[in-house]
Image: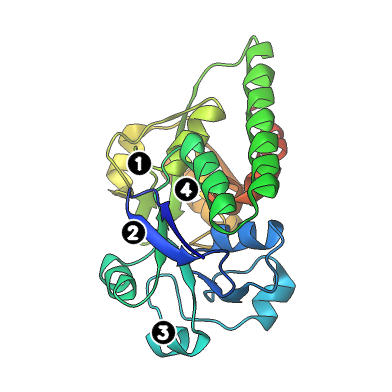
Amino acid sequence: MKTVFIDQLNRKVEINFPPKRIISLVPSQTELLYDLGLDDEVVGQTIFCIHPHNKHQSKPRIGGTKKLNFDKIAELKPDLIIGNKEENDQLQIEELMKLYPVWMSDIKTLGDALNMIERVGELVNKKDNALKISIEIKNNFTQLTHHLSLLTFHSQVKTLYLIWREPYIAVGKNTFIDDMLKRCGFENVVNEPRYPEITINKLQLLNPELILLSSEPYPFKQKHIDELKTICPNSKVILVDGELFSWYGSRLLESVAYFKNISYL
């Protein structure tokens, strides 16, 4: 049955409902589809869709999030493609839209993520499953807010979150990770939007109390902690799980428990 849905870019997307051959172009949304129970319906995913592990090994791969293999996508004959405004390349997405139904997410806050989860649930005929996941995530974050309110000594920690090295690239405003930092009680010291480059001189001028080194996309290690401590000797520097700060699908079910264990909390 032909059915029209509205994506998070406010586009109308007409699909044969329910979809039977889905390609996901974003790791966090791929994991969500499996957690909704769509093992058979997901027929293709990117090389970065590493969860769940057994599906990463067995499902056809259609390239990277920004380097899609159009021939492979054509072979898989999708009746629905799910992507994201930030994680996918605009020109490639526009080409796909000429050929297939493409539903796009646009996520900068927890509210956007919960909205995406529920709308994808409707899109793939798993509304109840999606609502259950969304409610549990929302409740977890409500508990995090309560947890922080009980820490009378807790004040917003001036924080720098790095995702890349050579050059250093930080998380700025108007990003999902920035929203996660706020919910942890951290104050992002970077005021620029998106993902600005940070020079060593600026690092020192920012003088954050806390520097978080993400496990992805750059694989920061202990040696990078040591490196940054020589640059910012007054900063505490720790490694963090980038998936739990940046994946905006069902992995958010695990985020709050992890956030509570970060030493500054």
- Camera-side residue: 223 or 151? 151
| Disc 3 secondary structure class | loop
Residue 174 position in % (x across, y down): 34, 39
The CA span between labels 3 and 2 is 29 Å
| Disc 2 secondary structure class | loop
Which residue shows up at 42% across the image and 46% down it? 107
The CA span between labels 3 and 4 is 38 Å
The CA span between labels 2 and 4 is 13 Å
- Camera-side residue: 208 or 256? 256
Q: Mark 2 — residue?
A: 167
As shown in the figure, which amino acid type bears the numbered disc 4?
A: Leu
Which residue shows up at 63% across the image and 30% down it? 141
| Disc 4 secondary structure class | helix
Question: Crowding near pointer 2: few (<14 within 10 Å), some, many (20+)?
Answer: few
Which residue shows up at 41% across the image and 90% down it? 71
As shown in the figure, which amino acid type bears the numbered disc 3?
A: Asn
As shown in the figure, which amino acid type bears the numbered disc 1?
A: Gly
| Disc 1 secondary structure class | loop
Residue 230 position in % (x across, y down): 46, 46
Q: Mark 3 — residue?
A: 69
The CA span between labels 1 and 3 is 31 Å
Q: Mark 1 — residue?
A: 172
Which is more N-terminal, label 4 or label 2? 2
Which is more N-terminal, label 2 or label 3? 3
Checking the image for residue 228, the label placed there is: 4
